Amino acid sequence: MSADTLAAVYVSVISMSIIFLVLSILIVTIKVLDKFIPYKAPPPPPAKKTRPAAAPAQDHETEEHVAAIATALTTALGRSPAEINIVRIDRI
């Protein structure tokens, strides 16, 4: 073996030893911290109340409902139909 190859092997062994040492120190540090500050799982989120699923309405029936609601809103608010924009309708 030449001197360059032997030097490269020494550098590789030393660098791998240093990396192994640093990783070992990190493992020990994490275990010590785990003893002093144990992990506490966060409380589970509150369960959402689900509404019973309604049967899907026909498109024609849904359009009629939206038209009826829009007409009622324009009459009650005294605005023109162009000023009313219904985005979502939720059943109560």
Image (cartoon, rainbow, N blue to C red):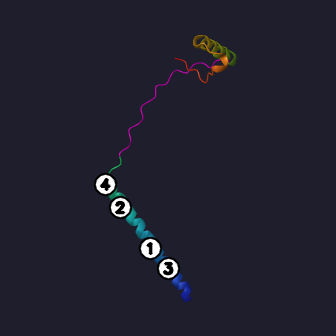
Check disc 2 and report its element: helix, strand or loop.
helix
User: In the image as oriented, which residue stretches furthest toward the bottom?
Assistant: 2
Residue at the limit of the structure toward the right, as seen here:
60
Which one is earlier in the sequence, the residue at label 3 or at label 4? 3
Measured Cα–Cα span from mark 2 to mark 1:
18 Å
Q: Which mark is residue 74?
A: none
Q: Amino acid at mark 4?
A: Lys
Q: Is residue 51 magenta?
A: yes
- Give the mark nearest the N terminus, 2 or 1: 1
Main SS, magenta residues: loop
Q: Of the residues under marks 2 and 4, which one precedes in the sequence? A: 2
State the separation of the CA atoms marked 3 and 4.
Answer: 36 Å
Residue at the location (46% across, 25% down)?
49
Query: Along the line of sight, which residue is nearer the eye, 56 or 77?
Result: 77
Q: Which mark is residue 11?
A: 3
Residue, disc 2:
29
Which badge, 2 or 3, is on the more N-terminal residue? 3
Dot 3 falls on a residue whose secondary structure is helix
Q: Residue at x 30, y 54 (%)?
A: 36
Label 1 and label 4: CA atoms lie apart by 27 Å
Quadrant location, the N terminus: bottom right
Give the labeled residue for mark 4: 35
Region rendered in magenta: 40-58
Where disc 1 sits, the SS reads helix
Whether 62 is among the magenta residues is no
